[in-house]
Amino acid sequence: MTSPAGSQTTARAPAPHQHLELAVSTVVFSLRPGPAQDRLTLWLPLVRRIRDPFCGRWALPGGPLEDHHDLAASARETLKATTGLEPRHLEQLYAFGDVDRSGQTDQRVVSIVYWALVRPEEDAEADHGDNVAWFPADETLRRHEDGTAPLAFDHGVILRYALQRLRAKITYSPIAHAFLPEEFPLTRLREVYEAILGRDLDPSNFRRQVLAQGSVESTGRRMTGTNHRPPLLYRSAPNRSRYTLTIEENP
């Protein structure tokens, strides 16, 4: 398996007697208000390393693959232990296995990476331990790539790949619905798209496309607790049609 585009890794021969270890890591995405504005932004939890290599740096939640766990169970176990999260949407993303990614000459680590997409009610259950913190995803990647706050191992490469995949997949699958509660107004669905893509979308065009391609269906109920005419509530119906959504380019 080749490295994701843009990883800029250089293959080299493994060291003699290099020990091979399997690990599982998870990129967790949740939608929270941005640090300087109220609009939703992609956030992710990171774990501060307390031992070498890369002691003191932030890293994705993860750990070694235990003998008694399959891959998905290991991802869920480490995610629960480090962040308190138990998300419904957990999906295998990619495998990363460059020879020198462990930072140790006598050890090679191959990581099976998952991504978890978190609903608001799941986010509310997240733990905030001494060595766990949440960060805006794009800012974290920017600070890693400009060298002001590099992540441990190759986790910057993994984060970049996960963001690229999410932004591509949102246009041809109902993956945005993984961030939503069971019932939601279409405005909330559009806010999810805008948060993931990082830009505003035309409300009328978005509504027309979503209703036309059939990934949602009306519940017949309206949102409560609003000051104005309450909007209709919808629920996901991703199996009703082939999913495509044309996202207009930036002007």
Image (cartoon, grey):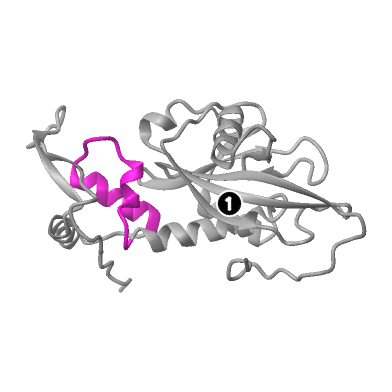
User: For residue 62, which quarter of the picture?
Assistant: top right
Query: Does residue 138 appear to the left or right of 123 in the view shown?
Result: right
Count neighbours of disc 1 (C-alpha within 10 A) and say few if under 14, some if 14 to 19, many if 20 or more.
many
Front residue of 205 and 61: 61
Query: Which residue lies most toward the right here?
Result: 16
Range of residues picked out in magenta: 171-198
Q: Which residue is the site of mark 1?
A: 140
| Vertical comparison of 133 with 143: above or below | above
Name the residue at 33% across, 55% down. 194
Q: Amino acid at mark 1?
A: Thr
Residue 146 in the image, given as x and y percentages of width and height:
66, 62
User: What residue appears at the point 62 percent right and 66 percent down from the top-left corner?
Assistant: 1
Q: Nearer the viewer, residue 175 or 141?
A: 175
Q: Is residue 218 above or below residue 124?
A: below
Q: Residue 179: x percent and y percent?
A: 35, 42
Kindly state the secondary structure of the residue where label 1 is placed.
helix
Lateral position of residue 225 relative to residue 175, left or right: left
Quarter holding the C terminus is bottom left
Q: Is residue 189 magenta?
A: yes
Q: Residue at x 12, y 32 (%)?
A: 227
Residue 138's spot in the image, x, y percent?
51, 55
Q: Indicate the position of residue 60 as horizontal and vertical percent values.
A: 62, 44
On screen, residue 203 versus residue 139, left or right, reads: left
